[in-house]
Image: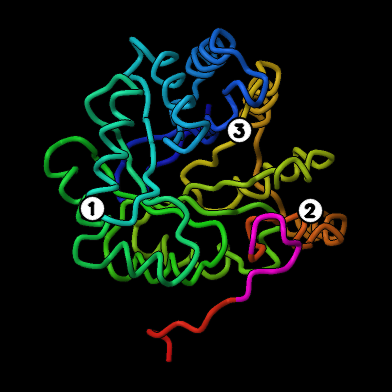
């Protein structure tokens, strides 16, 4: 498995990251299957695991903990907090560590910063950033992170204000065309040594007919890793095989791919870039006070 450095840190993470949102009952994945998939992923060279307490009310974290039991020194575990205040965030972390069965996480991130008020709350006195810094000082987390699906300007402002170690952002080929993190965030992140983690690579399955191209597009960007959700062993095996044969996408290949997928650049497809998840209407970028 190809590995890449984690931003400013020389630590190597696998090109393919394990997205643990779907190893849960609601995606028809049993606990036994989840454990087997996770352990097989480690065998195949995957060392980056991403989860969150909001994924099926903690079931994802619990299964990641069970699957990685005895393998802690071989893997990188990232989880999140949806809390915008210090106290709510620390409460999330306490629950996450308990469900994961570990005493620290490698990476802890503020989840889904979508609106300016989210960002301001995180940075406010008593905000979630205080929890991140405090948890790092106490050894409960190692790296500090932030994530966003919708508005790259907010994540760019976040890394200008604070030296986050990483950012998890939407980087599917469809994201390339509207509110593009590839254009508006990734160059600044690379300049500042912030590890970029790609998500939404398959656009909620909409890019399945172009799986190889979709993966190659994202992996050809300067990302440390890209997380793909799996709920079945054959999905994992296919993703690992794609990672192992990865070669960067050429400009000509990228243009050809874009020509095929452009009709899918719609708000009902890119739901994470809609004003509301199922609205079918594009998110309207608000004016930002710091840009006036």
Is residue 162 rendered to the left or right of residue 114? left
Q: For the view shown, which residue lies furthest in the left direction?
A: 138
Mark 3 vs mark 2, foreground winner is 3
The spot of residue 3 in percent (x, y) is: 46, 34
Quick one: SS at disc 2?
helix
- Give the number of the disc on residue 256: none
- Specify start and end residues of the magenta stretch as a single range: 276-284
Magenta-colored stretch includes residue 155 = no
**Other residues around mark 1 within 10 Å, as few (<14) / some (14–19) / many (≥20):** many
Q: Is residue 238 above or below residue 147?
A: above
**Other residues around mark 3 within 10 Å, as few (<14) / some (14–19) / many (≥20):** many
Q: CA distance from mark 3 to mark 2?
A: 25 Å
Quick one: SS at disc 3?
strand
Which residue is located at x 66 percent, y 59 percent? 175
Q: Is residue 206 above or below residue 176?
A: above
Earlier residue among tags 2 and 1: 1
Quickly name the residue at label 1. Answer: 86
Is residue 71 rendered to the left or right of residue 196? left
Quick one: SS at disc 1?
helix
Is residue 104 rendered to the left or right of residue 244? left
Quickly name the residue at label 3. Answer: 229
- Nearer the observer, 290 or 75: 290
Which residue is located at x 46 percent, y 34 percent? 50
The spot of residue 98 in percent (x, y) is: 29, 24
Q: Quadrant of the C terminus?
A: bottom left
Quickly name the residue at label 2. Answer: 253
Earlier residue among tags 3 and 2: 3
Mark 3 vs mark 1, foreground winner is 1
Earlier residue among tags 3 and 1: 1
- Nearer the observer, 72 or 183: 72
């Amino acid at each position: 498995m190809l590995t890449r450095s984690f931003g400013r840190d020389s630590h190597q993470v696998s090109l393919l990251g394990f997205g643990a949102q779907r190893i849960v009952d609601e995606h028809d994945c049993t606990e036994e299957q989840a454990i087997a998939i996770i352990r097989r992923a480690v065998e195949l060279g995957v060392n980056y695991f991403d989860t969150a307490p909001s994924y099926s009310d903690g079931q994802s974290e619990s299964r990641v903990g069970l699957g990685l039991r005895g393998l802690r020194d071989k893997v990188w575990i990232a989880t999140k907090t949806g809390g915008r205040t210090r106290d709510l965030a620390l409460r999330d972390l306490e629950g996450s560590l308990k469900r994961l069965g570990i005493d620290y996480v490698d990476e802890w991130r503020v989840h889904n910063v979508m609106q300016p008020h989210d960002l301001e709350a995180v940075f406010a006195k008593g905000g979630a950033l205080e929890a991140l810094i405090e948890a790092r000082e106490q050894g409960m987390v190692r790296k500090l992170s932030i994530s966003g699906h919708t508005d790259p300007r907010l994540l760019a402002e976040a890394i200008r204000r604070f030296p986050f170690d990483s950012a998890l952002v939407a980087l599917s080929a469809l994201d390339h065309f509207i509110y593009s993190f590839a254009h508006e965030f990734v160059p600044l992140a690379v300049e500042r040594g912030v590890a970029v983690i790609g998500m939404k690579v398959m656009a909620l399955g909409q890019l399945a007919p172009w799986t190889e191209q979709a993966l190659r597009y994202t992996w050809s960007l300067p990302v440390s890793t890209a997380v793909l959700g799996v709920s079945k062993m054959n999905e994992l095996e296919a993703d690992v095989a794609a990672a192992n044969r990865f070669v960067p996408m050429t400009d000509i290949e990228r243009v050809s791919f874009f020509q095929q997928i452009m009709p899918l650049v719609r708000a009902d497809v890119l739901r994470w870039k809609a004003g509301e998840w199922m609205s079918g209407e594009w998110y309207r970028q608000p004016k930002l006070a710091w840009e006036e």
